[in-house]
Amino acid sequence: MGRRMVYCDRNEPHDANTPGKPKAAAAGYAATGGAVNYTFQFGDVWAAWPSLLWGTWLTIQLSASTMVLGLLVAVICALGKTMGPRPVRWAVNVYIEVIRNTPFLVQLFLIFFGLPAIGVRLDSNEAALLAMVVNVGAYATEIVRAGIENIHRGQIEAGLALGMRPLQVFRYIILFPALKTVYPALCGQFILNMLASSVVSTISAQELTAAANDLQSSTFRSFEIYIVVTGIYLVLSLAFSGAFAAIHRAVFVESERG
């Protein structure tokens, strides 16, 4: 029978049941149930609150701009898909399928790193905004299209028969009821897009996650920083939900009462 050799530090007594591990370390490991001790230190995070606050404000700006422009893109594309000629419908379908079946990160890299190859140069913030608008526009197009197709053609014909101009028919009979029908789905999509804005930090666009990454690289308190950032994103989601609910009451509910 061969002889088993155990190598150990001559200055540390060792536990016979845990070869190679000092008795003190083994006792500490057992006392904590196998868990690693970690001391939370939020001091550096609180000291850098202006940076996180500024990143939060930039995220709000980026998300709000994306929502407005993305909704505009969605309305135009939804109209093109439902009422446009065949080439327009084909182009819109290609746009939707390409965007919805490719990763947002790849789309972001294509805009930021690819467009300069054809002479179009955007800074990181501009590229982030463009990528987010293109992405949310494709998803919101299908949502708005569903609302438009829910409008019965007889209502449109009735509006025209009453002497309404085409723009009035579009505004009061098509767009307004369609948006009212799909409003909850649009709000959910916009909140998901706000959360996805964290991805743009990969191209150094300035927003909350980018600010958190900069803070982490200087303090090395990753756990504390991203716990706080998680809480901030949760608050932002709830705040946007509250804002959307207020808009719904002001635009759709009050208009019916009026």
Image: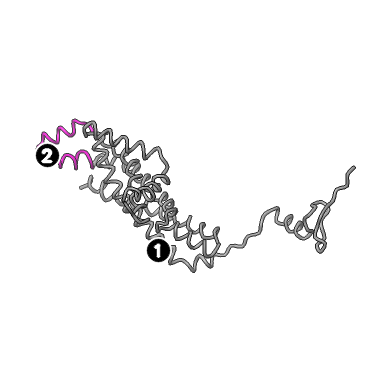
Where 40 sits versus 83, above or below?
A: below
In the image, 116 versus 158, the foreground residue is 116
User: Can you give x and y, in whole percent of width and height, for residue 245 in the image?
Assistant: 33, 50
Going 38% across and 56% down the picture, which residue do you hit? 59
Main SS, magenta region, reads: helix
Left/right of residue 45 with respect to residue 252 in the rendered view: right
* 249 with respect to 124 (left or right): left
Which label belongs to residue 54?
1
Judged from the image, the secondary structure of the residue bearing numbered disc 1 is: helix
Give the left or right position of residue 137, taking residue 9 as reference.
Answer: left
Q: Nearer the viewer, residue 198 or 114?
A: 114
The residue sitting at the right extreme is 1
Residue at the image position 24 percent from the left and 41 percent from the top: 76
Q: Distance of mark 2 from mark 1, alpha carbons?
A: 48 Å
Q: Which amino acid does the dot numbered 2 rest on? A: Met
Question: Which quarter of the rendering shows the N terminus?
Answer: top right
> Depth-wise, is mark 2 or mark 1 nearer the camera?
1
Point out the stretch of residues depicted in magenta. 150-175
The image position of residue 42, as x and y in percent, is 54, 65
Residue 24 falls within the magenta-colored stretch? no
Q: Which mark is residue 164?
A: 2
Q: Nearer the viewer, residue 235 or 204?
A: 204
Q: Quadrant of residue 173?
A: top left
Is there a contact, CB below 8 Å, between mark 2 and mark 1? Answer: no
Q: Which mark is residue 34?
A: none
Q: Secondary structure at mark 2?
A: loop
How crowded pointer 1 is (Cα within 10 Å; few <14, some 14-19, many 20+) is rated as: some
In the rendered structure, which disc, 2 or 1, sits on the residue that comes first in sequence?
1
Query: Is residue 230 placed above or below 175 in the rendered structure?
Result: below
Amino acid type at circle 1 is: Trp
Characterize the local packing of mark 2: few (<14), some (14-19) or many (20 or more) Cα atoms within 10 angstroms: some
Q: Position of residue 127 (x, y in %)?
A: 35, 52
